[in-house]
Image (tube, helix red, strand yellow):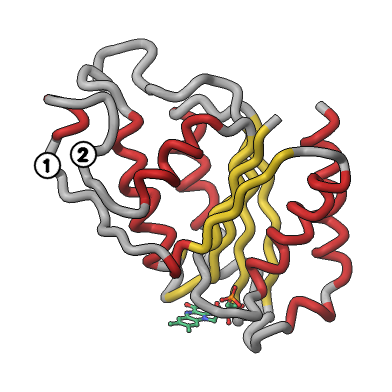
Amino acid sequence: MKIVCLLGSPRAKSNSSAIAQRFIDTAEELGVQTKTYRLNELKYRGCQACMGCKTKLDKCALKDDLAEVLEAVQECDVLVMASPVYFGEISSQMKGAIDRFYSFLKPDYLTNPNPVRLSAGKKLVFALTQGNPDKELFGDIFPRYDYFLKWYGFAESHLIRACGVRDSGAIETHGDILAEAEEIARNVCSN
Ligand SMILES: Cc1cc2nc3c(=O)[nH]c(=O)nc-3n(C[C@H](O)[C@H](O)[C@H](O)COP(=O)(O)O)c2cc1C
């Protein structure tokens, strides 16, 4: 089993990254191979809609730091994505990476019953943190990305959310959420 983790926060002591890290630490204790990418440290652009991945290549045509990340996502069994909520959305670092997932679609993806270049059955773990304590706010974010990734063949998905965590490191007082990340890691890694 291979786990790839994408961190979308620019912060060093990030709440969303801490949730992902608890998941990763647990997975590594169980002997699972993991690779984490801090997106904010990489140089890449969002999708340029060049259609190179549909007309010339079977992968993204852009040659930047995200090329390795896209390859790792293609090969992983479990994808962990952790992001802060910025203006009611995932961070631009994470959104830019997700837009490049367009390259995983085959040229005839609109009509092909197997439209995706990824193997089916991957698992998704999505961690989101927001300053606002109201869980009703921004609850629409995960279902939208889950919808697309289900279409991409992801078989199982888990959301870990922390609301009311604004300051750097505020997640440390939410032991229940970190414990949830640990429990999900144990379940995901044992199945
Ligand atoms: C640019 C910016 C935009 C933000 N927008 C929101 C928002 O729309 N709703 C919210 O509840 N919190 C918002 N926040 C607060 C963050 O979501 C919160 O601090 C979160 O825990 C950060 O996660 P991180 O530590 O992983 O970066 C914003 C923070 C920043 C810096």
Measured in 3D between alpha carbons, the distance from the residue under mark 1 to the one under mark 2, in whole angstroms, is: 8 Å
Q: Quadrant of the N terminus?
A: top right
Q: Which residue lies furthest to the bottom in this view?
A: 167
Considering depth in this image, is 140 or 177 the residue closer to the camera? 177
- Give the answer, above or below, for where 167 lies relative to 101: below
Among numbered discs 1 and 2, the one appearing first in the sequence: 1
Amino acid on which the number 2 mark rests in the picture: Ala
Q: What residue is shown at x 15% (from left), y 44% (from top)?
A: 49
Residue 48 is left or right of residue 18, and the answer is: left
- The picture places residue 109, in percent across and down from the top left corner, at 27, 21
Of badges 1 and 2, nearer the viewer stands 2
Q: What residue is shown at x 87% (from left), y 66% (from top)?
A: 176
- The picture places residue 128, in percent across and down from the top left corner, at 60, 63
Q: What element carries label 1?
A: loop
The circle drawn on residue 61 is 2
Amino acid on which the number 1 mark rests in the picture: Cys
- Give the answer, above or below, for where 150 lies relative to 80: above
Q: Mark 1 points at which residue?
A: 50
The circle drawn on residue 101 is none
Whether disc 2's CB lies below 8 Å from ligand 1 is answered: no
- The picture places residue 67, in percent across and down from the top left corner, at 35, 44
Q: In which quarter of the image is the C terminus?
A: top right
Q: Is mark 2 on a helix, strand or loop?
A: loop
Q: What residue is shown at x 81% (from left), y 64% (from top)?
A: 177
Which picture quadrant has residue 169? Answer: bottom right
Considering depth in this image, is 155 or 188 the residue closer to the camera? 188
- Give the answer, above or below, for where 79 lies relative to 11: above
Whether pointer 1 and pointer 2 mark residues with C-beta atoms closer than 8 Å, the reply is yes
Q: How many labels does the image show?
A: 2
